[in-house]
Amino acid sequence: MEFKLYVITDERYHPGRNMLDVIEEALRGGADVVQLRDKHASKREIYQKAVELRELTARYGKLFIVNDHPDIALAVDADGVHLGQDDLPIAAVRRIMGDRIIGISTHSLEQAKRAEAEGADYIGVGPVFATQTKEGATPVTVELVRQVAETIQIPYVAIGGIKLHNVDQVLEAGARRICAVSEIVGSEDVKGTCEAFLRRIKAHEQEV
Ligand code: TZP
Ligand code: MG
């Protein structure tokens, strides 16, 4: 899985703007992965959004991941699914998803190691900083990013409260892939924000 910038949908951050327009701007700005995440809509509504996002991401040749729902992911021919710690175990989802991508959110080094051992294709590490986007989650700090960078071989993406003004701290801790939600989809310049994130990520790759 080659990617640098991972964006997750959250329609609460762009009232009055169409989600597909916002995500298309992110793709034009260079986002490599789009995840559909909606904790409020009905399954039928999530499916309908997934159909549209699959079509859009395919047009840009980019990866499309569905949060929480392996059945929707398969039904729309998504590239993969993203799981939480309380979702079905990776081994069970592997039986459903075959070779497709399985990602999982992790909040400790133990969880990260277990996800790797269980065959996850990538992990999320976070929330790095405090965030309004995911309720009740305690920040894991950049220290966990540092530990994961030293320990884990599969791709890991840092997430949670990451903004243009603090992304350098996350990159300095070792992250090479960044996920941001509110900073991107809530921006008045979605494309420019993605481009700015990618400039920071690439600048860091050259320093090390
Ligand atoms: N998982 C960990 S933090 C988070 C998720 C889905 C939300 C990140 O959103 P933001 O707006 O980039 O802080
Ligand atoms: Mg979940």
Image: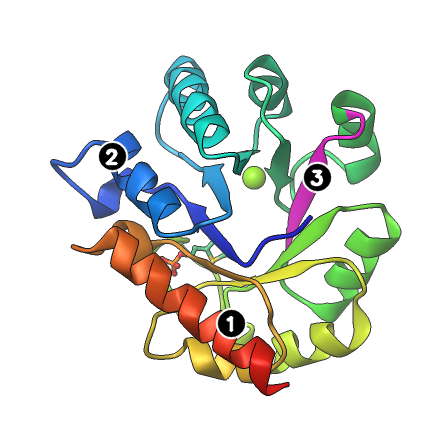
- Picture quarter containing residue 28? top left
The amino acid type of the residue labelled 2 equals: Asp
Q: Residue at x 65, y 42 (%)?
A: 86
Ligand 2 is within 8 Å of the C-beta of the residue at disc 3: no
Q: Is residue 163 magenta?
A: no
Which mark is drawn over residue 202? 1
Q: Nearer the N terminus, badge 2 or badge 1?
A: 2
60 or 36: nearer the viewer: 60
Residue at image mark 3: 102
Q: Nearer the N terminus, badge 3 or badge 2?
A: 2
Which mark is drawn over residue 21? 2
The magenta region covers 98-105
Whether 73 is drawn above or below 28: the answer is above
Name the side, left or right, on which 114 lies relative to 205: right
Whether 156 is drawn above or below 121: the answer is below
Q: CA distance from mark 3 to mark 2?
A: 26 Å
Q: Residue at x 57, y 63 (%)?
A: 177
Whether 182 is drawn above or below 65: the answer is below
Whether 79 is drawn above or below 77: the answer is below
Ligand 1 is within 8 Å of the C-beta of the residue at disc 2: no
Q: Residue at x 40, y 34 (%)?
A: 38
39 or 121: nearer the viewer: 121
Helix, strand or loop status at disc 1: helix
